[in-house]
Image (cartoon, grey):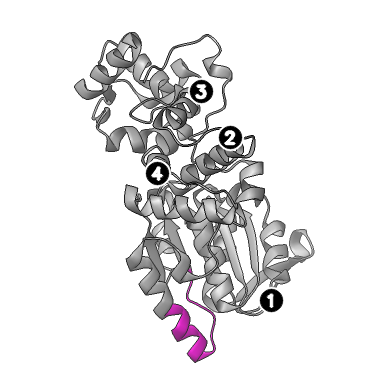
Amino acid sequence: MAIKSSKNEDKIERVIATWEKIEDTQNEVKLRPKLIEEYVWQEAIKSHLSIAIKSAQIRKEPLEHVLLYWPPGLGKTTLSLIIAHEMNVNLKHTSGPAIEKQADIVSILTSIQEWDILFIDEIHRLKPQIEEILYWAMEDFSIDIMIGTGTGATSIKMDIPKFTLVWATTKLSMLSSPLRDRFGNIMKLDFYNDAELAIIVKRSFGILNCTISNWDIYDIVAKKSRWTPRIANRFVKIVRDYVTVGSDIESRLWIDNIFVSLWVDDRWLDILDRKILGSLADNFWGRPVWLNTLASMVWEEEDTIEDVIEPYLLKIWFIERTARGRQITEAGKSHLDKSRKL
C-alpha cells in the first residue's frame, strides 16, 4: 500500500490520535459500555472492581478511591462511568488543568452528594496546594475553609459528603507518594489485542446501526487501531460514513483505500509518526537526541511525543530510549525507507 508524501500532510488531522476531540466526546457517549460485563478485556480490573463495588454496596459505604493509569484511549473515562452506573450514583467530571484555584476544588467538593463519583483526569497536572486540600477530603471527608483575610483569618473545618474519587493519569511517576498511598484501588490499564478490539469494533458497528456483511472488515479495522479502543471507535465512525453514502464495502481494496486517504500506512503509522522517524533518521543521522530537541524539530509538544506517539513506536521497536536520548532503530529505518520508496 502506497503512502505518498505531500506538502499538505501537516494540515491533515491526526485520525489515530488517542486524545478525545469535542465531536468524539459527543459521539462516544452511546458507544461506551455502562456495565462491567459489557466492558471488553482488562479482566483483572473488571474482576477486582466487581468485588469492590459489591462489597461497598453491602457495607453501605462509598467505594474506595480509585487510581487509573497508563496511556490515553484505553478506557479510563469509560471505567469511571461504569463505576458510577454500577453504584447507581452521579458522576462529576473535571480535569487537573481546569482546577486552578483552591476555591475551585472547594466548590466542587461542597456540591457533590453522598456516595457520588468525582472523576478527575490528568491529575499529574494538579497544583500542590490543590492536592493538600484533597488529602483531608479523601481521608476524613472534610475540608478547611479560610474565613477572613490577613491576621484576622481563621480556619474552619467543614464536613463534606462521603464520596469516591476516581483519578486518571498517564504519568504515575509524577504523583507524590502521599497522594498515591491514599488510593485503595490502583489499577493499570494495558493495550488491547486485535481479537478483543475486533469485538469492540463489531459492537460499535451494531450500536451505530451500520450493517457490515464482510466480517473481515472488523479484523482489518481492529488491526489498524494500534491496540487502542478510542482509535478503533474513531475508525468505525469513519467507515460508517462511507457506508452511509453508499460506498461498496465488500472488498479489501476498499478498506485499504480509506486508510490510504487517512495517510495511515501498512504498519499503522500516520503523518506525525513518520515525521518523528524521519527527523531522527535525517536530522540526527540515527544518533540519540534529547526529547526537547526532537520536539523543537517537529514542532510538537514534549508531552504529546512522550505520552501519545512514543508508546506505540516503542512497542513496535521503531525507536528506543537510551541514556543519551531517543534513537531510531534499524527496524524503524527499514520501514521509513520502504514507505519512502512506495
Q: Dot 2: within a 10 Å radius of its alpha carbon, few (fewer than 14), some, or many (20 or more) residues?
A: some
Q: Going 38% across and 17% down the picture, which residue do you hit?
A: 2
Return the residue at label 1.
113
Return the residue at label 4.
222
Q: Dot 1: within a 10 Å radius of its alpha carbon, few (fewer than 14), some, or many (20 or more) residues?
A: some
Q: Secondary structure at mark 2?
A: helix
Q: Is residue 321 visible?
A: yes
Residue 111 is situated, as x and y percent measured from the top left of the image, at 73, 70
Q: Inspect the magenta stretch and tell me whether residue 125 lies in it.
A: no
- Look at the image and tell me in which quarter the C terminus lies: top left
Mark 1 belongs to which amino acid?
Gln
Return the residue at label 2.
242
- Earlier sequence position, callout 3 versus callout 1: 1
Residue 196 is situated, as x and y percent measured from the top left of the image, at 36, 54
Mark 1–mark 2 Cα distance, whole angstroms, equals 44 Å
Residue 219 is situated, as x and y percent measured from the top left of the image, at 37, 44
Mark 2–mark 4 Cα distance, whole angstroms, equals 17 Å
Mark 2–mark 3 Cα distance, whole angstroms, equals 12 Å
> Can you say whether 248 is above or below 69 in the image?
above
Mark 4 belongs to which amino acid?
Ala
Q: Which residues are magenta?
A: 52-65
Q: Is residue 135 visible?
A: no
Of 162 and 202, nearer the camera is: 202
Return the residue at label 3.
261
Of 180 and 46, nearer the camera is: 46
